[in-house]
Amino acid sequence: MQARAVGLRLRLFGGHGYMLEYPITRLYADTRITHMYAGTSEVMKVIIAKSPGL
């Protein structure tokens, strides 16, 4: 939901959304990295769950 909301706001700002002077740029970067961390956590959970002895 966060990614969708920030994506819509980024479209609203247009090219200004990619300029470091605007807060939307920080929100966009934070949203992107959150997806990477969340995916990494899920992959690690699967690896740990499949490890022998558990």
Image (cartoon, helix red, strand yellow):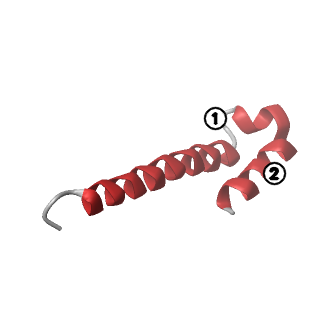
Does residue 45 lie above or below 40 as drawn?
Answer: below
What is the secondary structure assignment of the residue under circle 1? Answer: loop
User: Which residue is pictured at 50% across the width and 46% down the height?
Assistant: 33
User: Which residue is pictured at 59% across the width and 51% down the height?
Assistant: 31
What is the secondary structure assignment of the residue under circle 2? Answer: helix
Q: Calculate the distance from the C-alpha at mark 1 to the C-alpha at mark 2.
A: 18 Å
- Taking depth in this image into account, of 21 and 25 the one nearest to the observer is 25
Rendered image: mark on residue 34: none
Q: Position of residue 13 (x, y in %)?
A: 83, 42
- Taking depth in this image into account, of 8 and 37 the one nearest to the observer is 37
Q: Position of residue 20 (x, y in %)?
A: 63, 35
Crowdedness of circle 2 by 10 Å Cα count: few (<14), some, many (20+)? few
Q: Which residue is mark 2?
A: 8
Q: Position of residue 53 (x, y in %)?
A: 13, 64
Image quadrant of residue 48? bottom left
Image quadrant of residue 42? bottom left
Q: Quadrant of the C terminus?
A: bottom left
Residue type beneath disc 2: Leu
Q: Position of residue 1 (x, y in %)?
A: 69, 63
- Residue most extreme to the front: 52
Circle 1 or circle 2, nearest the eye: 2
Q: Which residue is mark 1?
A: 20
- Taking depth in this image into account, of 24 and 28 the one nearest to the observer is 28
**Which numbered disc flags the more N-terminal residue, 1 or 2?**
2
